[in-house]
Amino acid sequence: MTVNGSRVFVVDDDDSVCRALARLIQSAGYGVETFGSARAFLGRVCTVNTPACAVLDVQLPDLSGLELQRELNAALPVIFVTGHGDIPMTVGAMKAGATDFLSKPVQDADLLRAIGQALERAAQTHAIRCEVDALRRRVDRLTPREREVMELVVEGRLNKQVASELGTAEQTIKIHRGRVMAKMEVASLAELVRIADKIGLGAPAEPPASR
């Protein structure tokens, strides 16, 4: 299954391998870019804003594929395709988050299966990131006082408790709370709490410790 707008990045210092993999990947309907070194790829990956995965050789002229994987720090799924792998290397790569570790010469079907799975994972991650970014933009609409009110409300504070903590009238808090609900585009406190949880804003207040 192809993922619309997805990109596959091939990093291998063998031009013939890059060309062959690019042809195969393009034949499956994916966009593809090739790179001859880890550093060249790192200069590109920071600008990626679409579901993507990387197909990496282990032996590269600057950083190794495994070092490149660490540099990427899970920014996108990684598939290794190498003629120099061994069991410890495979285990290490998989523990570090690689989605697959394939030996050259790789079967076309195996590589395309691995790419499809990696891009599906990338699409899910991308959708979550886009949702969180959109929610944070809503938060940015809030005034500093409205944000304070939101943080206290999602902790479970009542209007009168929020008013007491912020040193203002309960009616004023009700007005701020209404504006928060409107700017955050929610109709209920439950929705507001779910948004706060998704973006890491606020947390339920802990019950007082028993004495």
Image (cartoon, rainbow, N blue to C red):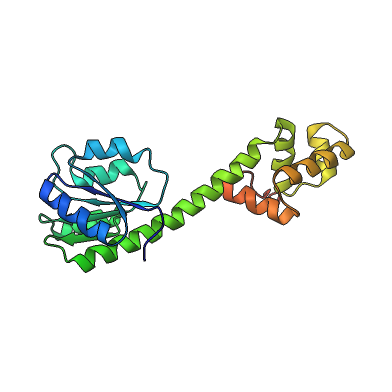
Judge whether residue 200 can be spotted in this image.
no
Taking depth in this image into account, of 90 and 37 the one nearest to the observer is 37
Quadrant (top left/top right/bottom left/bottom right) for the N terminus:
bottom left
Q: x, y (%) of residue 191?
A: 69, 55
Q: Residue at x 62, y 43 (%)?
A: 201
Q: Residue at x 74, y 36 (%)?
A: 146
28 with respect to 12 (left or right) = right
Q: x, y (%) of residue 77?
A: 33, 53
Count up the numbered dots. 0
Residue extending furthest bottom?
109
Judge whether residue 100 can be spotted in this image.
yes
Q: Is residue 131 above or below residue 90?
A: above
125 with respect to 96 (left or right) = right
Q: Residue at x 42, y 44 (%)?
A: 49
Q: Residue at x 55, y 50 (%)?
A: 131
Q: x, y (%) of residue 177?
A: 79, 43
Q: Quadrant of residue 161?
A: top right
Q: x, y (%) of residue 160?
A: 85, 42
Taking depth in this image into account, of 153 and 179 the one nearest to the observer is 179
Q: Is residue 118 above or below residue 205?
A: below
20 with respect to 200 (left or right) = left
Taking depth in this image into account, of 82 and 155 the one nearest to the observer is 82
